[in-house]
Image (tube, grey):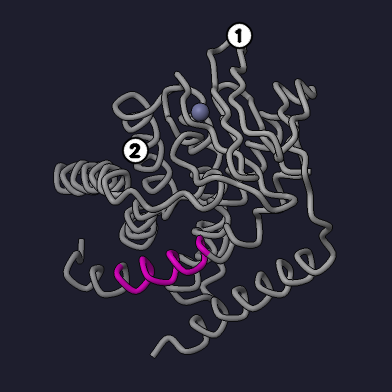
Amino acid sequence: MKKKELIFVLLLFVAAALFYGVTAYQKKASDVAAISIDGTLWKEVSLSEDGTYTIETPQGYNIVQIQKHTAAVIEADCPDQLCVQQKSIKQPHEMIVCLPHKVVVEIK
Amino acid sequence: MDSRKIAYCALLSAVALLLGYVERLLAVPMVVPGMKLGLANVVVLLALYLFDAKTALGISLVRILLSGFVFTGFASFLYSGAGAMLSFLAMAAFQKTKRFSMVYVSIIGGMSHNIGQMIFACIAVENIRLLYYLPILLVIGGATGFLTGIVGEKTIVYLKY
Ligand SMILES: [Zn+2]
């Protein structure tokens, strides 16, 4: 029952797994997290140094914490709190997005 | 529009709103930015098959507007609105050809929901590299669409209008 549809979803899964497999293979270990506001780079921070950074945007603030080579948003006053709920990042390409504040934290 | 149809539409809108709330309660771990299951999609799917595209669009709009006001802020309202609109357009188009099963239409709906959200997010934060998350979001959208499609197919038998 619903075999074709299930196969379609499984193929989708395989394609995505291949994509992430290839990008993970190509990646170089990274030490920098780039924080940008509204598409403009605000600060590049090192993942080797623990610390917290408060980002002030016209819409509100986000607090980014660097700890044990991972980056996370630990506090924000945005209405949806999605950036706070998202788990910490450390691999290249990974990013945390706060849509209401237009803030992006991205591992380089 | 007769009163029976009005009652159906009100019921479907309420269920959509409720499913959106349940999804929030489930607190699915946010592995990727903007990840959402899209359970409420099943209601738009049902409206599409029970009535027509116009009615499904109406219910979809009511859901986005209400949940935007009730649960979230303006940015996420636009964000989920972009997803819901693309999802509606894709489902309506695929359903119209009559060459795809209800489950397929639902899968397409789930995937395009996430495509729409992603495009909006890329524009909003002006960062195209967000697309890195598109493959996983397509898998999540497709898988949820598959499940809600089966639910829709089983439910519609009891909902004959
Ligand atoms: Zn946020």
- In the displayed structure, B150 sits above or below A96; it is below
Q: Which residue is mark 1?
A: A58
How far across and how far down the image is residue B84, in percent?
A: 49, 44
How far across and how far down the image is residue B117, in percent?
A: 58, 43
| Magenta stretch: helix, strand or loop mostly | helix
Q: CA distance from mark 1 to mark 2?
A: 29 Å
How far across and how far down the image is residue A107, in percent?
A: 73, 43
Left or right of B76: which side holds A12?
Answer: right
Label 1 beta carbon within 8 A of ligand 1: no
Front in this rendered view, residue B106 or A30: A30
Q: Quadrant of residue A52?
A: top right
Q: Quadrant of residue A57?
A: top right
Residue B118 among those drawn in magenta: no
Give the chain letter at badge 1. Answer: A
- In the displayed structure, B58 sits above or below B89; it is above
Q: Which residue is mark 2?
A: B63
Magenta extent: B140-151
Q: Residue at horizontal 61%, vertical 8%?
A: A58
